[in-house]
Image (tube, helix red, strand yellow):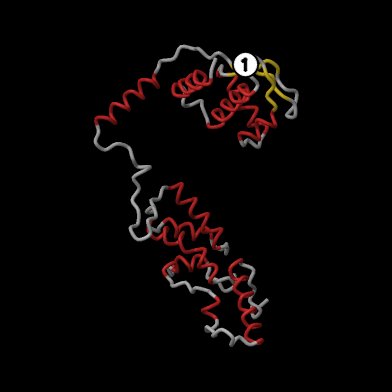
Amino acid sequence: MDIYSLSRNFWDFAYDNPELIKPNHCALYFFVIEHCNRLGWKQKFGLPSAMAMEAIGIKSHNTYSKTLNDLVEFGLITMIQQSKNQWSANIVAISNFNKAHSKALDKALIKHGAKQRESTHQSIDSIDIPIYKSTNLPIYKSTSIQRESDFEFFWDSYNKKIDRAKCEKAWNKLNDSEIQKIIDTVVDYVKANPDLQFRKNPSTYFNNKCWNDEIPNYKSNQLLKEIPPGKMTKGLMQQQEIYNELLEQIENGTYVNPFARK
C-alpha cells in the first residue's frame, strides 16, 4: 500500500462513478491517507472527528459523518469501531481497494492526449488570456458565477443597500467592460463620497452610469496650496493637521458630515 496506488485507485473509482463522488469525499479521503502516513502506515488508527473536520473545512458534524460513511460504503475506508459522539475518534483502516475497474480513466486520458497532439490549437485558455495593453491586466470575461461574485463585491463595497432586486436586474444588463470598470473604480468612488446619506442610491448609480464619472483625488497637497519652506505659520500648521485628519477619516470610511440632518 502506497500513496500513489491509493490515489490512482480513488480517481479510477471517481471517474467510473461521477454521480457519487463529491469534493468532501476527496478532501476527507486524502486527509485520511495523510494522517495514516504520518502515523507510520498503521493498519488501524484513530481518526478524531474534530481534527478531521478542522483540517478539511467541514463545519457540520452531520456532513462529516455522512461523508465518512459514504467512503466506508464505497469500500475506500473500513470502519473498525465507530465513535460514540462527535468528540471521540473513529477507529478506521484504509481499504486495499482493488476492485476491478474498466480502466475508463486511462483510456480517456490517452485519447485526450492524442487529440491534443493532433490539434494545433491546444487548450491554453488558462494561460493565454487577453490583456489590456495599457494596464497589462487581464480583460474581464464574465460567467454567471463570476457575475454573481462581482455583484456581491460591488454591493458590499458600495454599502448603501437599497433596492437590491432592481440593482441585480440592472447589473445583469451590463456588458463585461462596464462591469470591469465598476470593479476597478467602486472603492475609490465610495471614498470620494464617504457620507452615506448623500451617496447616490445604487439604482441611481446604475441608471446614470456613475462609474464613468470623474472621481476627485483627495490628497492634502490639493486641499492646501503649496507653502514655501519656512513660511508655515502656527495657524496654517493647525489647518494642515485638520485637513490630514479629515483625509484619514475619508479614507477609512469614518467621516461623518456635521451638517447632515439627523
Examine the image and state in which quarter residue 84 appears.
Answer: top right
Residue 51 to residue 105: above or below: below
Across and down, in percent, residue 49 comes to 69, 29
- Identify which residue is drawn at 56% across, 84% down: 229
- Identify which residue is drawn at 26% across, 38% down: 121
Q: Amino acid at mark 1?
A: Thr
Across and down, in percent, residue 143 comes to 41, 47
Q: Quadrant of the N terminus?
A: top right
- Identify which residue is drawn at 48% across, 67% down: 205
- Residue found at the far front of this picture: 230
Examine the image and state in which quarter residue 223 appears.
Answer: bottom right
Residue 71 to residue 229: above or below: above
Residue 235 to residue 16: above or below: below
Image label count: 1
Are there few (<14), some (14-19), or many (20+) residues within 10 Å of tag 1? Answer: some
Q: Quadrant of the C terminus?
A: bottom right
| Residue marked by disc 1 | 78
- Identify which residue is drawn at 42% across, 58% down: 180
Examine the image and state in which quarter residue 28 appears.
Answer: top right
Across and down, in percent, residue 120 comes to 24, 36
Residue 120 to residue 183: above or below: above
Across and down, in percent, residue 91 comes to 69, 19
Secondary structure state at the residue bearing disc 1: strand
